[in-house]
Image (tube, rainbow, N blue to C red):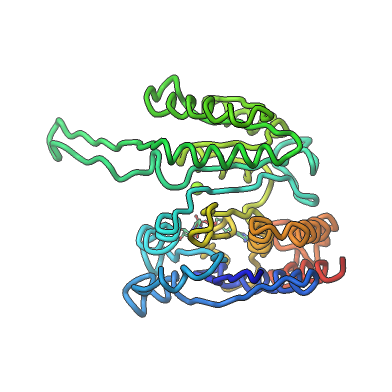
Amino acid sequence: KTLKIAVVPGDGIGVEVMPYGVRCLQAVAQKFNLSLEFEHFNFASCDYYEKHGDMMPADWKEKLSKFDAIYFGAVGMPDQVPDNVSLWGSLLKFRREFDQYINLRPCRLMPGVKSPLAGRKPGDIDFWIVRENTEGEYSSVGGTMFEGTERETVIQETIMTRVGVDRVLRYAFDLAASRPRKKLTSATKSNGISITMPYWDSRVREMHKQFPDVAVEQYHIDILTAHFVQRPDSFDVVVGSNLFGDILSDLGPACTGTIGIAPSGNINPSGEFPSLFEPVHGSAPDIFGKGIANPVGMIWAGQMMLHHFGFTEAAAAMLSAIENVLARADLEIMTADMGGRGNTQSLGEAVEKEILAT
Ligand code: NAI
Ligand code: MG
């Protein structure tokens, strides 16, 4: 099967790290005889906005629908275009209109990376965070009443649907069931948020009946954030609503080192629409143009993409190549965010070479 990939570098360092992501994917494709097809698009960028007055062409959905995946860099150049315009005009459109209801991030301490948590070694921290990506707290239902008066009141509703909750829970249970530890942790706040969160809890209990092999634990979000820092080794798959998942999926990777290496998937599991794979980091205007951005987040996102589409062996080899290069911790090759004197090119090419060599 040919995997059709739309390459959308976007803005800033997205443009600088993307070539190494594509080169590493091509290297692994050559090695494992995979058929990967790439097509590049220059929209979903602030440069495109300045030329066309919009982040994307009107027929963007038609253009991208025929791909299996979108390989995405980063979007946003706050000096050029306000962040809400660039983000809502591109990435959030992809997530919503392609029904990418799963946001998936690994939280894995890699060799050669210093965890800000004392005493943790590679292998100690290795879990997935599954965030609901389309509903929940991030609804636009609500409004302002009595504006400008002393009675001024603002309301914003949380929306949870049975379909929406069940499908993210099913994905998380499936993922947990596929792993050796078979453990699922669910984040809510049912003592304070008294309607939607107990509903989520009840759907967890219901879904658990279909996955009797999976051990389930449920925590309130406040204590769970403490556990992330104090005993990150105890997690396997963590699932949360849109807001709680958002918070956890920044905290988790922060516990495992630099933002420059973390990847993320926005997934439409049915495959009806393309899924999107991107590094966690943004466009980093502060280092853009210097060629020093860490390309590992972009490369690892490509690895997640291969894994998602079932190229398990190639994905495993790609992850090993990333780990081998990081483990060597050659400061001439590593980028500055990892304490090195290298740049995007030296680190990107080292991973590419490692893929071809192993
Ligand atoms: P950012 O992730 O772009 O940068 C945060 C800090 O981390 C900066 O100091 C940056 O230099 C550093 N950093 C990020 N990636 C790095 C890498 N690969 N190697 C070395 N250092 C790296 O987040 P920030 O500054 O909040 O946002 C900048 C722009 O990016 C904004 O327009 C924002 O809206 C956008 N953004 C886009 C995202 C996306 O496309 N998914 C995600 C986050 C932010
Ligand atoms: Mg976030």
- The image quadrant of residue 63 is bottom left
Q: Is residue 72 visible?
A: no
Q: Is residue 318 visible?
A: yes
Q: Residue furthest bottom?
A: 51
Question: In the figure, is residue 95 to the left or right of 321?
Answer: left
Q: Position of residue 225 (x, y in %)?
A: 57, 31
Specify whether 78 is left or right of 222: left
Label total for image: 0
Q: Is 150 situated left or right of 43 in this image?
A: left
Q: Could you tell me which residue is drawn at 79 percent across and 69 percent down?
A: 32
Furthest residue in direction top, as rendered: 191
Quadrant hosting ligand 1 = bottom right
- Which quadrant: the C terminus? bottom right
Q: Choose top left, top right, bottom left or bottom right for residue 171.
A: top right
Residue 24 horizontal/vertical position (percent): 72, 70
Q: Is residue 318 left or right of residue 70?
A: right
Q: In the displayed structure, would residue 102 be above or below residue 194?
A: below
Q: Judge whether 55 appears above or below 301 on screen.
A: below
> Residue at 62% of width from left, 55% of height from top?
263
- Indicate whether 99 appears above or below 344: above
Q: Position of residue 164 (x, y in %)?
A: 43, 41
Instruction: Indicate the quadrant containing the N terminus: top left, top right, bottom left or bottom right.
Output: bottom right
The image position of residue 212, as x and y in percent, is 65, 27
Residue found at x 45% / y 23%: 190
